[in-house]
Image (cartoon, helix red, strand yellow):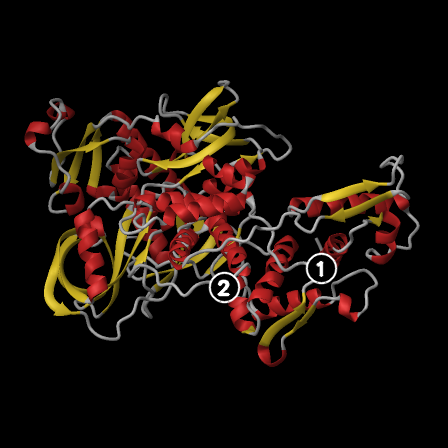
Amino acid sequence: MSVSRTERLLNLLIALLNTRYGLRRSELREKVYHDTSGNDVAFGRMFERDKNDLRQFGFDVETLTDLGWSEDDPATTRYRIGKESNRLPDVQLEPEEWTVLLLASQLWERAALGTAAQSALRKLKASGQLADVELPAGLQPRIKPAGQAFDDVVAAMHSRHPVTFSYLAGSTGKDEVRTVEPWGLGSRFGQWYLVGHDRARQAARHFRLSRFTSAVAILDKEHYSPPADFNIRQELDRLPELPLRAAVVDVREGRLLALRRRALAAAETPADAAAQGRPDAGFERIALHFRDPEILAEELASYGPDARAVAPEELVVAVRRRLRAAADFSASPTPDYSFSPARSRPSRSRTSEDQLKRMLQLVPFLVHNQGLHIQEVADHFGVSRDELEDDLRILICSGLPEGYPDDLLDIQWENDHVFITQDLDLNRPVRFTVDEACALLTGLETLNGLPGIAEGGALESLTLKLLAAAGEEGLRAASLAGPEMGPADAAIHDTVRQAIGSRSRLHLTYLSPQRDKVSERDVDPLRLYSLDNTWYFEAYCHLVDGLRNFRLDRVQDVYPNGQHAADGLTASGAVPAKLFTPNDDDTTVTVQLTRQGRGLADDYYAERTAELPDGGLVAEIRFGNTAWLPMFVAQHGGAVRIIAPEDLATSARVWLEASLARYGG
């Protein structure tokens, strides 16, 4: 959709909104389209496309006819859009509800639903002033979607298109191509599951996204209808947790403290462990519980030559497969790529559809927020000042067909402050899209188990208000379910949260798996945040004199040491909080990511990216500690490889070869 088409659609929308009687096609052709070509067929096709585009934005284009005449007669057929067509109802929120809403809108770590949540929040802000609220001290829960497959499945599910993908079947251990009508997507047991109709088996099935072995292909020329009463949470509640089993693993002496902490006592070791032969010299044999061999295989693969899965056989096969895939990808030819000049995090390319959606939010936002600085408005919409001024220039040239100057949108930004005095009935935002409704309502339901959030009734009242405002789109939120957000160790979570609120210093005993050591340190905690139910806290660490992030499940002991936190310390400021704090002496590493693994560019805050023809990426990422990069490559089993620096790429390949040698090469 070109800029001229963006202007045309905006003018067509204004014309149809501001007519009570309706406008004939000939009037629209002359006054809005300025078409004098005389080609009725070409104009008719263009007009039908534009009507469909407006319907996709949610505006119902009404067709009116004179009494006794047919719609087939263009001379007697008129078109208009009702004043209330697709308008978001007024939603009045209390300060406590704004607090919960801000938390819910920040939940999605990235991906399409993160963009949708921010868009929905802007619509609510556009209909009224945001109350002055304070978020709970240092608390930033987040949902981490399962890579690119998550985005693709959500897009297909909301547009009602089937999907196809390769899947590692748990029953056979083989790759199988599946074609599925996606009904719902939800998180259980720390994993994301797709529930839908498997066309080959003619039955409903569950699919774990971490078992997808190919990119998701959307069959956008086919459609389906999901069950009317489908609810993903109810469906996943019936999903049984995998049984607890015991694995046998050989571990290098004196290494892998995190794994050894979970070792079973001798009485719990499988009776047939001794039958697996003796461990190699320098290794010890341990047993540990697991439920899913793929999850444990991911961890064991990351330990490389320091660990070898011994039993059961399916675990051995899963680790070997990951190491083989990582080694093959690392040995493949380097693709041609070119970084764009601007250094920026990867983002979805902006389209003219995005621009029109933004402008439909921009007008009501300016109506309710007169006189804001132009840069503040640009920041609010996540665009540059130049992009915002492009929007404003299109808007001030838009208005009623062949109208007087008073019939145009009147927007001024003299002295860098933006005012609007003529809005032409665009003063209310359009209704939530399905993505926007799902992002907010799923986020609110996910917050339900978070300490300190559900009390007081604000969460429940806000949910009811948004359900009423979302209408039919809100009902579609039953197809999406977030993870449980409650921390595994509530006592440690509470200790850190209280210390943040009281500005107290903590003494910490902490296990670092990457460095394979336990350390003691004094820290000043600044904020708590999560990825699903894995919780972290950011703190100023006095041992290293800098900001660091700590996982709560790796904290062995924590207590206030009786001192106050240092004055003037603040969190890094990023929302959402970053797992990794950049430093001047970090190493810039160039990695190649497959389409399945491209989400790692966001996870690790890539500074530059280059698109590849197969849907993958080349990304530049800064790492403070490069010694663990071979673990990183092995863990993701063929989704990532190191391209540069060459010495790091070579080290990773050698490390992977040594790891495979532990399994017979």
- What number is the disc on residue 3? 1
- In the depicted view, which residue is nearer to us: 489 or 23? 23
As helix, strand or loop, the secondary structure at mark 2 comes to loop
- What number is the disc on residue 575? none
| Residue that numbered label 2 is attached to | 129
Q: Position of residue 265 (x, y in %)?
A: 8, 33
Mark 1 → mark 2, Cα distance in angstroms: 31 Å
525 in relation to 279, above or below? below
Displayed quadrant of residue 507: bottom left
Q: Position of residue 500 (x, y in %)?
A: 23, 62
Quick check: 198 left or right of 246? right
Displayed quadrant of residue 460: top left
Q: Residue at x 13, y 25 (%)?
A: 270
Q: Residues within 10 Å of mark 2 (few under 14, many from 20)?
A: few
Quick check: 348 left or right of 134? right
Disc 1 marks a residue whose amino acid type is Val
For this orientation, the residue located farthest to the bottom is: 415
For this orientation, the residue located farthest to the left is: 267
Q: Quadrant of the C terminus?
A: top left
Q: Residues within 10 Å of mark 1 (few under 14, many from 20)?
A: some
- The answer to whether residue 380 is seen in the rendering is yes
Displayed quadrant of residue 582: bottom left
463 in relation to 295, above or below? below
Q: Residue at x 32, y 59 (%)?
A: 580
Quick check: 116 left or right of 589? right
Whichever of callouts 1 and 2 sits on the residue coming sooner in the sequence is: 1
